[in-house]
Every structure is written in C-alpha cells, then in structure tokens.
Image: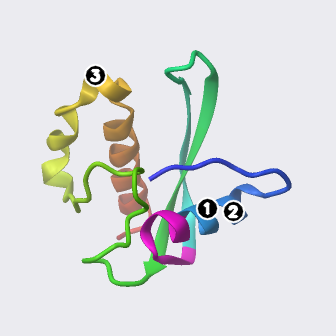
Amino acid sequence: MGGHVESGETLEEALYREVQEETGWRVSVVIGLIGEYTYTGNDGIQRVETDYLVRVDGDLARPQLEAGKHTEFRWLTESEIEVLDEHRDVNDGLIRTIAEDGFAALHAIGL
C-alpha cells in the first residue's frame, strides 16, 4: 500500500487517509516507525517512503482494495517472506526490505 502526502497534510494524516482509501480499514494505533527508504521512481524522480507499523480496525480478511492500486492482497508470516523475491526486479527488493524491517520492529517491541 502506498500514497502521497497532500498539500497541507502531515505524514500521520496521510497515513490515516491512505489506509482508509486503499483498504477500507481505519488506523486505530500507530505502533511505530518501521523506516524511511529513498528510491528513484520510474520517472527518474527521487522519493522518500516512510513506513509505519499500525493496528487497524476492519475486516482483515476482506479489505476494500482501491481499484487500480493493487495487484494482490496476501498476509505473510515471517517464514514466508521469500515470496516477496518473486518480483524483486520491479522494486529492487524494497518490499522485502520493508517487510523484514517490519518483522524486526515487531520483535523489538515483543510482539
């Protein structure tokens, strides 16, 4: 899931809005920052992505995925993370890095 900060919006406001728009879920708790990642988009523009670990309210088995924004929905356990290597060439492994950092954040807080 991803999105952009709109004019006049804070990162946290964008997080709440994007989760709602792209999944139908509502952020109930921001647990913490996973990390910030710099990458160059297909258009050649350098971007910074900020990822958070959150709890959400809603039907976790049936997200209301925003049309045209997602190719797949799937929950992964830490032992299944290698599935993220299937399309590594598309994102230079960034999705796997974010997932690994997310699991590390969960371990750090004892979850």
Q: Position of residue 29 (x, y in %)?
A: 56, 77
Q: Is mark 2 on a helix, strand or loop?
A: helix
Query: Which circle marks residue 89 in the picture?
Result: 3
Task: Left or right? Give the position of 34 relative to 83.
Answer: right
Nearer-the-camera pick, 103 or 50:
50
Where, quadrant-wise, is the C terminus in this rendering? bottom left
Residue, disc 2 = 12
Q: Would you say the residues marked 1 and 3 are in contact, meaning their CB atoms lie under 8 Å apart? A: no
For marks 1 and 3, the one nearer the N-term is: 1
Q: Find the magenta span and give its range.
A: 19-29
User: Residue at the top extreme?
Assistant: 44
| Residue at image location 15% in from the left, 42% down from the top | 83
Q: Which residue is drawn at 20% across and 46% down?
A: 81
Do the residues under discs 2 and 3 have CB atoms within 8 angstroms?
no
Where is residue 97 drawn, in percent x and y? Answer: 36, 37
Disc 1 designates what residue?
15
